[in-house]
Amino acid sequence: MTTAQPAPAPLTRPELVCPAGTPAALKSAIDAGADCVYVGFRDETNARNFPGLNFNRRELAEGIEYAHGKGAKVLVAVNTFPRAGQPEIWHRAVADCDELKADAVILADIGLIDHAARHHPNLRLHLSVQAAASNPDAIRFYADRYGIKRVVLPRVLTVQEIAEVNARIAPIETEVFVFGGLCVMAEGRCALSSYATGQSPNINGACSPASDVRYTETNEGITSELGGFTINKFAHTEPAGYPTLCKGRFIANDKASYLFEEPTSLNTLAILPDLIRAGVTAFKIEGRQRGRAYVAAVVGAFRQGVDAVLAGKSLPDIDLDRITEGGKQTTGAYEKAWR
Protein backbone atom coordinates (compact mmCIF):
# COMPACT_ATOMS: atom_id res chain seq x y z
CA MET A 1 0.00 0.00 0.00
CA THR A 2 1.48 3.33 -1.03
CA THR A 3 1.49 6.28 1.30
CA ALA A 4 0.05 9.49 -0.07
CA GLN A 5 2.64 12.21 -0.42
CA PRO A 6 1.83 15.61 1.12
CA ALA A 7 0.89 18.29 -1.35
CA PRO A 8 3.68 20.81 -2.04
CA ALA A 9 3.39 24.08 -0.16
CA PRO A 10 1.71 26.82 -2.20
CA LEU A 11 4.09 29.29 -3.80
CA THR A 12 4.17 32.81 -2.37
CA ARG A 13 3.64 35.59 -4.90
CA PRO A 14 6.76 37.78 -5.09
CA GLU A 15 6.48 41.52 -5.59
CA LEU A 16 7.67 42.83 -8.94
CA VAL A 17 9.87 45.87 -8.15
CA CYS A 18 10.48 47.95 -11.24
CA PRO A 19 12.66 50.93 -12.20
CA ALA A 20 11.33 54.42 -12.78
CA GLY A 21 13.87 57.04 -13.76
CA THR A 22 11.19 59.55 -14.75
CA PRO A 23 7.52 60.23 -13.96
CA ALA A 24 6.62 58.83 -17.39
CA ALA A 25 8.53 55.61 -16.68
CA LEU A 26 6.77 55.31 -13.31
CA LYS A 27 3.38 55.30 -15.01
CA SER A 28 4.58 52.88 -17.69
CA ALA A 29 5.90 50.44 -15.09
CA ILE A 30 2.71 50.49 -13.02
CA ASP A 31 0.46 50.22 -16.08
CA ALA A 32 2.52 47.22 -17.26
CA GLY A 33 1.95 45.37 -13.98
CA ALA A 34 4.56 46.51 -11.46
CA ASP A 35 3.72 45.92 -7.79
CA CYS A 36 6.33 48.51 -6.73
CA VAL A 37 8.49 51.09 -8.43
CA TYR A 38 11.77 52.43 -7.12
CA VAL A 39 12.87 55.99 -7.81
CA GLY A 40 15.42 58.57 -6.71
CA PHE A 41 15.62 62.30 -6.07
CA ARG A 42 17.26 64.55 -8.66
CA ASP A 43 20.54 64.91 -6.78
CA GLU A 44 23.53 62.93 -5.58
CA THR A 45 21.60 61.06 -2.88
CA ASN A 46 20.83 58.28 -5.34
CA ALA A 47 23.10 56.03 -7.38
CA ARG A 48 21.59 56.94 -10.76
CA ASN A 49 22.36 60.64 -10.65
CA PHE A 50 22.26 61.35 -14.38
CA PRO A 51 21.01 64.49 -16.21
CA GLY A 52 17.36 64.24 -17.22
CA LEU A 53 16.56 61.49 -14.72
CA ASN A 54 14.89 61.25 -11.33
CA PHE A 55 12.25 63.22 -9.43
CA ASN A 56 11.84 66.53 -7.69
CA ARG A 57 9.60 66.61 -4.60
CA ARG A 58 6.45 67.63 -6.46
CA GLU A 59 6.92 64.92 -9.08
CA LEU A 60 7.50 62.31 -6.38
CA ALA A 61 4.33 63.37 -4.53
CA GLU A 62 2.35 63.02 -7.76
CA GLY A 63 4.03 59.68 -8.52
CA ILE A 64 3.16 58.30 -5.10
CA GLU A 65 -0.44 59.44 -5.52
CA TYR A 66 -0.64 57.74 -8.94
CA ALA A 67 0.93 54.52 -7.66
CA HIS A 68 -1.25 54.30 -4.58
CA GLY A 69 -4.31 54.94 -6.71
CA LYS A 70 -3.38 51.84 -8.75
CA GLY A 71 -2.59 49.71 -5.69
CA ALA A 72 1.20 49.92 -6.20
CA LYS A 73 4.02 51.04 -3.90
CA VAL A 74 6.85 53.56 -4.30
CA LEU A 75 10.31 52.88 -2.85
CA VAL A 76 12.85 55.71 -2.81
CA ALA A 77 16.56 54.99 -3.22
CA VAL A 78 18.73 57.18 -0.99
CA ASN A 79 21.56 54.76 -1.61
CA THR A 80 24.77 56.77 -1.92
CA PHE A 81 27.15 57.55 0.93
CA PRO A 82 26.99 61.01 2.55
CA ARG A 83 30.04 63.23 2.45
CA ALA A 84 31.94 63.24 5.71
CA GLY A 85 30.62 66.10 7.84
CA GLN A 86 28.07 67.11 5.17
CA PRO A 87 25.08 64.79 5.56
CA GLU A 88 22.41 67.48 5.26
CA ILE A 89 21.01 66.68 1.81
CA TRP A 90 20.88 62.98 2.66
CA HIS A 91 19.05 63.72 5.92
CA ARG A 92 16.63 65.95 4.02
CA ALA A 93 16.02 63.21 1.44
CA VAL A 94 15.07 60.72 4.16
CA ALA A 95 12.83 63.27 5.89
CA ASP A 96 11.06 64.03 2.62
CA CYS A 97 10.47 60.32 1.99
CA ASP A 98 8.77 60.18 5.36
CA GLU A 99 6.74 63.33 4.78
CA LEU A 100 5.63 62.29 1.28
CA LYS A 101 4.51 58.87 2.56
CA ALA A 102 6.88 56.78 0.49
CA ASP A 103 6.32 53.08 1.15
CA ALA A 104 10.00 52.53 2.00
CA VAL A 105 13.41 54.14 1.69
CA ILE A 106 16.37 52.13 0.35
CA LEU A 107 19.56 52.97 2.27
CA ALA A 108 23.20 51.86 2.08
CA ASP A 109 25.24 53.99 4.50
CA ILE A 110 25.17 52.71 8.08
CA GLY A 111 25.30 56.22 9.55
CA LEU A 112 22.31 57.28 7.46
CA ILE A 113 20.48 54.10 8.42
CA ASP A 114 21.06 54.91 12.09
CA HIS A 115 19.80 58.48 11.52
CA ALA A 116 16.66 57.23 9.75
CA ALA A 117 15.90 54.65 12.44
CA ARG A 118 16.21 57.24 15.24
CA HIS A 119 14.50 60.22 13.61
CA HIS A 120 11.90 58.50 11.41
CA PRO A 121 10.74 55.43 13.34
CA ASN A 122 7.60 54.98 11.23
CA LEU A 123 9.47 54.94 7.91
CA ARG A 124 10.01 51.46 6.50
CA LEU A 125 13.72 50.80 5.86
CA HIS A 126 15.18 48.57 3.14
CA LEU A 127 18.88 47.75 2.91
CA SER A 128 20.33 48.64 -0.48
CA VAL A 129 22.42 46.25 -2.52
CA GLN A 130 25.10 48.95 -2.13
CA ALA A 131 25.53 47.81 1.49
CA ALA A 132 26.71 44.41 0.19
CA ALA A 133 25.09 42.34 2.97
CA SER A 134 25.09 38.77 1.66
CA ASN A 135 25.15 36.51 4.72
CA PRO A 136 22.69 35.91 7.58
CA ASP A 137 24.88 37.47 10.29
CA ALA A 138 25.26 40.76 8.42
CA ILE A 139 21.58 40.89 7.52
CA ARG A 140 20.45 40.13 11.07
CA PHE A 141 22.74 42.86 12.41
CA TYR A 142 20.95 45.49 10.31
CA ALA A 143 17.53 44.10 11.23
CA ASP A 144 18.17 43.75 14.96
CA ARG A 145 20.02 47.06 15.34
CA TYR A 146 18.10 49.32 12.97
CA GLY A 147 14.84 47.59 12.13
CA ILE A 148 15.63 46.86 8.49
CA LYS A 149 12.63 45.01 6.99
CA ARG A 150 14.10 43.95 3.64
CA VAL A 151 17.56 43.41 2.16
CA VAL A 152 18.43 43.66 -1.53
CA LEU A 153 20.87 40.81 -1.99
CA PRO A 154 24.11 41.33 -3.96
CA ARG A 155 24.32 39.53 -7.29
CA VAL A 156 26.92 37.02 -6.06
CA LEU A 157 24.77 34.21 -4.61
CA THR A 158 23.47 31.02 -6.21
CA VAL A 159 19.78 30.14 -5.97
CA GLN A 160 20.60 27.51 -3.35
CA GLU A 161 22.59 30.01 -1.31
CA ILE A 162 19.66 32.46 -1.46
CA ALA A 163 17.33 29.73 -0.19
CA GLU A 164 19.70 29.00 2.69
CA VAL A 165 19.93 32.69 3.60
CA ASN A 166 16.13 33.00 3.57
CA ALA A 167 15.76 30.00 5.84
CA ARG A 168 18.03 31.61 8.43
CA ILE A 169 16.80 35.22 8.42
CA ALA A 170 12.99 34.89 8.31
CA PRO A 171 10.89 36.99 8.67
CA ILE A 172 13.33 39.50 7.15
CA GLU A 173 12.45 39.89 3.47
CA THR A 174 14.84 39.46 0.54
CA GLU A 175 14.82 41.16 -2.84
CA VAL A 176 16.92 39.92 -5.76
CA PHE A 177 17.74 41.30 -9.20
CA VAL A 178 16.11 39.42 -12.05
CA PHE A 179 16.93 41.54 -15.11
CA GLY A 180 19.29 44.29 -16.25
CA GLY A 181 22.86 45.42 -15.92
CA LEU A 182 25.42 43.54 -13.89
CA CYS A 183 28.25 44.83 -11.71
CA VAL A 184 31.44 42.82 -11.30
CA MET A 185 32.65 44.84 -8.33
CA ALA A 186 31.77 44.36 -4.67
CA GLU A 187 28.40 46.08 -4.53
CA GLY A 188 28.71 49.66 -3.36
CA ARG A 189 32.47 49.67 -3.36
CA CYS A 190 33.28 50.51 -6.98
CA ALA A 191 35.90 53.19 -7.50
CA LEU A 192 37.01 52.40 -11.06
CA SER A 193 35.22 55.16 -12.96
CA SER A 194 36.22 57.75 -10.34
CA TYR A 195 39.85 57.31 -11.42
CA ALA A 196 38.92 58.35 -14.95
CA THR A 197 36.31 61.03 -14.21
CA GLY A 198 36.93 62.32 -10.67
CA GLN A 199 33.29 61.55 -9.85
CA SER A 200 32.62 58.86 -7.25
CA PRO A 201 29.75 56.46 -8.03
CA ASN A 202 29.35 55.95 -4.29
CA ILE A 203 29.05 59.65 -3.35
CA ASN A 204 28.17 61.55 -6.53
CA GLY A 205 25.89 58.74 -7.68
CA ALA A 206 27.02 58.31 -11.29
CA CYS A 207 29.10 55.46 -12.66
CA SER A 208 30.63 56.71 -15.92
CA PRO A 209 28.75 60.04 -15.95
CA ALA A 210 27.44 61.01 -19.37
CA SER A 211 29.42 64.27 -19.40
CA ASP A 212 32.64 62.22 -19.53
CA VAL A 213 31.49 59.79 -22.23
CA ARG A 214 32.53 60.21 -25.88
CA TYR A 215 31.81 58.11 -28.97
CA THR A 216 33.90 58.62 -32.11
CA GLU A 217 33.00 57.05 -35.44
CA THR A 218 35.82 55.99 -37.78
CA ASN A 219 36.12 53.90 -40.94
CA GLU A 220 36.79 50.86 -38.74
CA GLY A 221 33.84 51.38 -36.40
CA ILE A 222 33.07 53.21 -33.17
CA THR A 223 35.51 54.11 -30.39
CA SER A 224 34.15 54.75 -26.89
CA GLU A 225 35.98 56.89 -24.33
CA LEU A 226 35.53 57.74 -20.66
CA GLY A 227 37.30 60.76 -19.21
CA GLY A 228 39.64 60.84 -22.22
CA PHE A 229 40.59 57.17 -21.90
CA THR A 230 39.76 54.72 -24.67
CA ILE A 231 37.49 52.01 -23.25
CA ASN A 232 36.50 50.03 -26.32
CA LYS A 233 36.45 49.83 -30.11
CA PHE A 234 33.46 48.29 -31.87
CA ALA A 235 33.05 47.17 -35.47
CA HIS A 236 30.11 48.72 -37.33
CA THR A 237 28.21 45.41 -37.08
CA GLU A 238 28.93 44.95 -33.33
CA PRO A 239 26.57 46.18 -30.56
CA ALA A 240 28.25 49.01 -28.63
CA GLY A 241 28.06 48.79 -24.83
CA TYR A 242 28.05 51.75 -22.47
CA PRO A 243 31.66 52.73 -21.62
CA THR A 244 32.20 51.53 -18.07
CA LEU A 245 35.74 50.48 -17.21
CA CYS A 246 34.67 47.10 -15.84
CA LYS A 247 33.14 46.28 -19.24
CA GLY A 248 35.97 47.71 -21.32
CA ARG A 249 38.09 45.77 -23.78
CA PHE A 250 41.82 46.00 -23.12
CA ILE A 251 45.04 44.58 -24.53
CA ALA A 252 46.89 42.08 -22.32
CA ASN A 253 49.53 39.67 -23.58
CA ASP A 254 49.05 41.18 -27.05
CA LYS A 255 45.38 40.19 -27.13
CA ALA A 256 42.36 42.48 -26.90
CA SER A 257 39.66 41.01 -24.66
CA TYR A 258 37.14 41.76 -21.91
CA LEU A 259 39.31 41.36 -18.81
CA PHE A 260 36.52 41.82 -16.25
CA GLU A 261 33.15 41.21 -17.91
CA GLU A 262 31.56 41.34 -21.34
CA PRO A 263 28.67 43.74 -21.95
CA THR A 264 25.70 41.53 -21.11
CA SER A 265 22.40 41.66 -19.21
CA LEU A 266 21.07 39.52 -16.41
CA ASN A 267 17.89 37.65 -17.43
CA THR A 268 16.32 35.14 -15.04
CA LEU A 269 13.03 34.46 -16.83
CA ALA A 270 14.01 30.80 -17.29
CA ILE A 271 14.71 30.25 -13.58
CA LEU A 272 11.81 32.18 -12.06
CA PRO A 273 10.30 28.99 -10.53
CA ASP A 274 13.59 28.29 -8.71
CA LEU A 275 13.81 31.82 -7.32
CA ILE A 276 10.20 31.73 -6.14
CA ARG A 277 10.77 28.37 -4.41
CA ALA A 278 13.87 29.86 -2.76
CA GLY A 279 11.56 32.13 -0.76
CA VAL A 280 12.43 35.48 -2.35
CA THR A 281 10.02 38.28 -1.40
CA ALA A 282 10.60 40.59 -4.35
CA PHE A 283 12.04 40.53 -7.87
CA LYS A 284 13.93 43.66 -8.87
CA ILE A 285 14.44 44.88 -12.43
CA GLU A 286 17.47 47.13 -13.01
CA GLY A 287 17.33 50.12 -15.35
CA ARG A 288 16.32 53.50 -13.98
CA GLN A 289 18.41 55.09 -16.71
CA ARG A 290 16.43 53.30 -19.43
CA GLY A 291 13.39 54.64 -21.28
CA ARG A 292 9.67 53.91 -21.11
CA ALA A 293 9.77 51.30 -23.89
CA TYR A 294 12.40 49.27 -22.00
CA VAL A 295 10.46 49.53 -18.75
CA ALA A 296 7.15 48.49 -20.32
CA ALA A 297 8.70 45.57 -22.22
CA VAL A 298 10.64 44.09 -19.30
CA VAL A 299 7.91 44.64 -16.70
CA GLY A 300 5.33 43.08 -19.02
CA ALA A 301 7.56 40.07 -19.64
CA PHE A 302 8.19 39.41 -15.97
CA ARG A 303 4.56 40.02 -15.06
CA GLN A 304 3.66 37.25 -17.51
CA GLY A 305 6.43 35.02 -16.18
CA VAL A 306 5.55 35.35 -12.49
CA ASP A 307 1.83 34.93 -13.15
CA ALA A 308 2.47 31.80 -15.24
CA VAL A 309 4.57 30.18 -12.51
CA LEU A 310 1.97 30.87 -9.83
CA ALA A 311 -0.77 29.48 -12.08
CA GLY A 312 1.22 26.28 -12.66
CA LYS A 313 1.62 27.05 -16.36
CA SER A 314 4.67 26.86 -18.62
CA LEU A 315 6.87 29.93 -18.79
CA PRO A 316 6.10 32.11 -21.80
CA ASP A 317 8.68 32.23 -24.57
CA ILE A 318 9.70 35.90 -24.52
CA ASP A 319 12.72 37.25 -26.41
CA LEU A 320 14.34 40.28 -24.74
CA ASP A 321 17.56 40.25 -26.78
CA ARG A 322 16.77 43.56 -28.45
CA ILE A 323 16.91 45.45 -25.15
CA THR A 324 19.83 43.68 -23.46
CA GLU A 325 23.29 45.17 -23.20
CA GLY A 326 25.46 43.91 -26.03
CA GLY A 327 22.58 41.74 -27.23
CA LYS A 328 23.61 39.04 -24.72
CA GLN A 329 21.97 37.49 -21.68
CA THR A 330 23.16 35.54 -18.64
CA THR A 331 21.82 34.12 -15.38
CA GLY A 332 24.99 35.37 -13.68
CA ALA A 333 25.88 33.93 -10.29
CA TYR A 334 22.47 32.35 -9.78
CA GLU A 335 23.59 29.26 -11.70
CA LYS A 336 27.34 29.68 -11.36
CA ALA A 337 29.46 26.56 -11.72
CA TRP A 338 32.80 28.17 -10.84
CA ARG A 339 34.52 28.66 -7.49
Image (cartoon, rainbow, N blue to C red):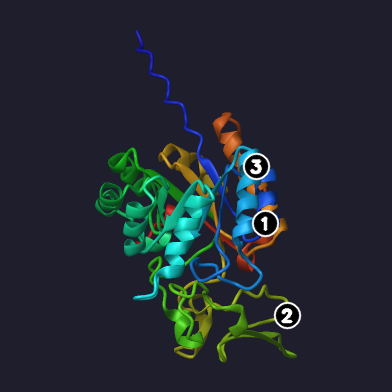
Name the element at disc 1: helix
In the rendered view, tell whether residue 90 sits above or below residue 284. below
Q: Residue at x 44, y 89 (%)?
A: 253
- The residue singled out by tag 2 in the image is 236
Q: Nearer the viewer, residue 62 or 292?
A: 62
Badge number at residue 33: 3
* Percent of width and height locating residue 3: 35, 12
**Identity of the residue drawn at 60% across and 75% down:** 242
Which numbered disc, 3 or 2, marks the residue that appears first in the sequence?
A: 3
The amino acid type, in three-letter code, at marker 2 is His
In this figure, which residue is indicated by the disc labeled 1? Answer: 23
Q: Can the viewer see residue 219 in this picture? A: yes
- In the displayed structure, 101 sits above or below 327; it is above
Q: Hey, what amino acid is under mark 3? A: Gly
Q: Secondary structure at mark 3?
A: loop
Please identify, in this view, whether the residue under mark 3 or under mark 2 is nearer the observer.
3
